[in-house]
């Protein structure tokens, strides 16, 4: 039996109002209740689930319910205050999509740097470079500093580079809401190709059409808790009913 692509057990992460909580050594050796402070809140608490290789998971919930926080924990961008996150293999993170690119470096230099930091060998970056630039539709700007690109061009470049990574798990956070319709269609087709090749998808979106298109299973987060883990249609129906009820 294969190991799960993602396994989350008792996951919790705590924030302070307006800034990330910091913990002293005394805090670390104290119990969770004792460590809590009046200006702190739990963005996620006691969340557990597992994702099998090749599954397509949609994370559903209102704004501020912990969806993007969960994605960052799976990506390793955040560390949990409680519980564990185990990921089998690497992740291709399409979250805060233009993060990590360096403004003063050219497009060419940023492609090499970003792909290399994600483990793509230099020869492979060179082999795929033209394809990444063509997908992003910025062939006239390869030697332009990244900071001079428009926001749309930055998003196209970031999606193009990250979606070329060979990591087995694809993390997507609202990226398809950005950009023009023609480029979104290119993104859809690219994600379809990745899913057809057996990739695992962990997808956060408010777009019900996208969730139904790409996902077979849903996780419904409410007030930082996992309230439903079920087929995506059932999760969306529950979310819509709760949202209608106010």
Image (tube, rainbow, N blue to C red):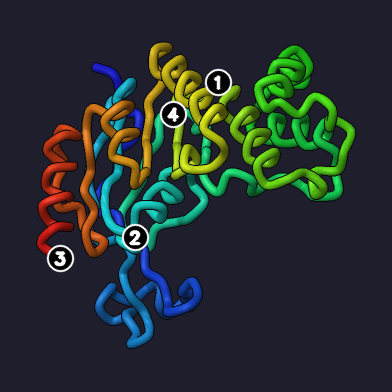
Between circles 2 and 4, the one closer to the viewer is: 2
Instruction: Where is residue 15? Give x, y as percent.
Output: 41, 71
Q: Residue at x 60, y 22 (%)?
A: 164
Report which quarter residue 144 is drawn in.
top right
Q: Which is nearer the N-term, disc 2 or disc 4?
A: 2
Which numbered marker is on residue 63?
Answer: 2
Asked whether the residues under the numbered discs 3 and 1 touch, taking CB atoms below 8 Å apart as contact, a structural biologist would say no
Q: Which residue is mark 4?
A: 169
Q: Residue at x 73, y 23 (%)?
A: 133
Which numbered marker is on residue 34?
Answer: none
Q: Residue at x 42, y 12 (%)?
A: 197
Q: Nearer the viewer, residue 144 or 95?
A: 144
Dot 4: element: strand
Estimate how packed mark 1 is, as few (under 14), some (14 to 19) or many (20 or more) residues with alpha carbons within 10 Å. Answer: some
Dot 1: element: loop
Q: CA distance from mark 3 to mark 4?
A: 35 Å
Estimate how packed mark 3 is, as few (under 14), some (14 to 19) or many (20 or more) residues with alpha carbons within 10 Å. Answer: few
Location of the N terminus (image quadrant): top left
How many numbered discs, if any?
Answer: 4
Q: Which is nearer the N-term, disc 1 or disc 2?
A: 2
Between circles 3 and 2, the one closer to the viewer is: 3
Instruction: Where is residue 188? Give x, y as percent.
Output: 45, 25
Between circles 3 and 4, the one closer to the viewer is: 3
Q: Which residue is mark 3?
A: 246
Q: Which residue is mark 1?
A: 166
């Amino acid at each position: 039996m294969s190991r799960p692509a993602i396994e989350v057990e008792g996951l919790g992460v705590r924030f302070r109002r307006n800034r990330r909580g910091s913990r002293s050594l005394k805090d670390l050796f104290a119990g969770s209740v004792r460590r809590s402070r009046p200006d702190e809140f739990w963005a996620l608490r006691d969340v557990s689930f597992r994702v099998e290789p090749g599954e397509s998971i949609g994370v559903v919930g209102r704004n501020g319910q912990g969806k993007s926080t969960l994605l960052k924990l799976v990506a390793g961008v955040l560390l949990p205050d409680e519980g564990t996150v185990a990921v089998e293999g690497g992740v291709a993170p399409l979250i805060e999509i233009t993060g990590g690119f360096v403004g003063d470096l050219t497009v060419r230099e940023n492609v090499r740097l970003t792909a290399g930091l994600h483990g793509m060998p230099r020869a492979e970056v060179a082999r795929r470079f033209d394809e990444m630039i063509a997908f992003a539709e910025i062939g006239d700007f390869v030697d332009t500093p990244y900071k001079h690109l428009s926001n749309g061009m930055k998003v196209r470049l970031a999606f193009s580079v990250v979606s070329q990574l060979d990591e087995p798990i694809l993390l997507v956070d609202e990226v398809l809401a950005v950009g023009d319709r023609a480029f979104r269609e290119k993104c859809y087709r690219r994600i379809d190709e990745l899913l057809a090749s057996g990739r695992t998808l962990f997808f956060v979106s408010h777009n019900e059409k996208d969730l139904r298109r790409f996902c077979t299973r849903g996780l419904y987060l409410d007030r930082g808790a996992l309230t439903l883990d079920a087929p995506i249609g059932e999760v969306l129906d529950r979310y819509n009913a709760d949202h209608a009820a106010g």
